[in-house]
Amino acid sequence: MTQQIVLAICSFALALLGTLLLSALSLVVARSGSCSRSFRFETEARALTLLKGWLSPKQRACYERFRYFDVTGSDTGTRYRIHHGTQTNIEELSSTGHHVCKWCFVPDGDLVAGDVMLAQKIALETNERGALSVAHRSFVSNGPRRF
Amino acid sequence: MATQIVMDRTGDTRHTFDVQDRAEVEKAERRFRDLTGAGFTAAVRSGPGEQRVIRSFDPTAEETLFYPRLVGG
């Protein structure tokens, strides 16, 4: 009888300990996730501040209103629209402002949108052919659009 | 003071150096060579919204931006 009581108490104590450990673990995981989100947010904010510092006043105004800005290719004079994003976010426009195709090239590494867009801007405005030589081109149509 | 801005996973890392300090300028020049040798492109601002790519270290540039090699996405 005494043995059964001791066993019951031990089982209860173990269950309690397990619950406490699980609670502590979930708290640590939640905090870690929150830190990670906070770090990502700060990184993106830093990169956007840098980007805006390198945009022309016109590009900056356009980006702040529409989350895209236009650049002119250094070699062909083609107009490109760089949308906020990190993948397939460059749109080539015709002289009449129609969608021609999409281009995708990015700086190597896991960079956030602000950095990616800034590298794309500088590359297209200073070395358009070099940038497009490594890019992937996509002809997926978004329907008739005029800009 | 001049600044070298290197894009990375934290957004960017900034290295400032005193253009009057020879040792600091040499260190900045080494960093320039290391980064461009590793495939980074270096650019400096030449006007509002305008920039030029530089192939050699420019100690007079107030701000030099480095971005990694471009790859197809």
Image: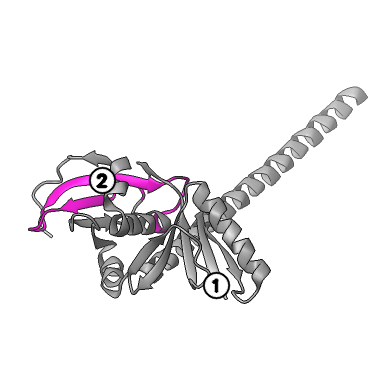
- Mark drawn on residue B2: 1
The quarter of the picture where residue A127 lies is: bottom left
The quarter of the picture where residue A54 lies is: bottom left
Classify the position of the N terminus of chain A by image quarter.
Answer: top right
The quarter of the picture where residue A122 lies is: bottom left
Q: Which residues fall within the magenta stretch?
A: A86-114
Query: Horizontal and vertical percent for residue A5?
Result: 87, 28
Magenta stretch: residue A90 in it?
yes
Determine the chain carrying the residue at label 1: B
Question: Vertically, is A27 above or below A81?
Answer: above
Binning the other alpha carbons within 10 Å of mark 1 as few (below 14), some (14 to 19) or many (20 upward) gives some
Determine the chain carrying the residue at label 2: A
Inspect the image, locate mark 2, and give the three-letter code of the amino acid beneath it: Trp
Inspect the image, locate mark 1, and give the three-letter code of the amino acid beneath it: Ala
- Horizontal side of B17 relative to A89 (left or right) equals right
Magenta stretch: residue A65 in it?
no
Camera-nearest residue between B7 and A1: B7
- Mark drawn on residue A103: 2
Classify the position of the C terminus of chain A by image quarter.
Answer: bottom left
Q: Residue at x 34, y 74 (%)?
A: B47
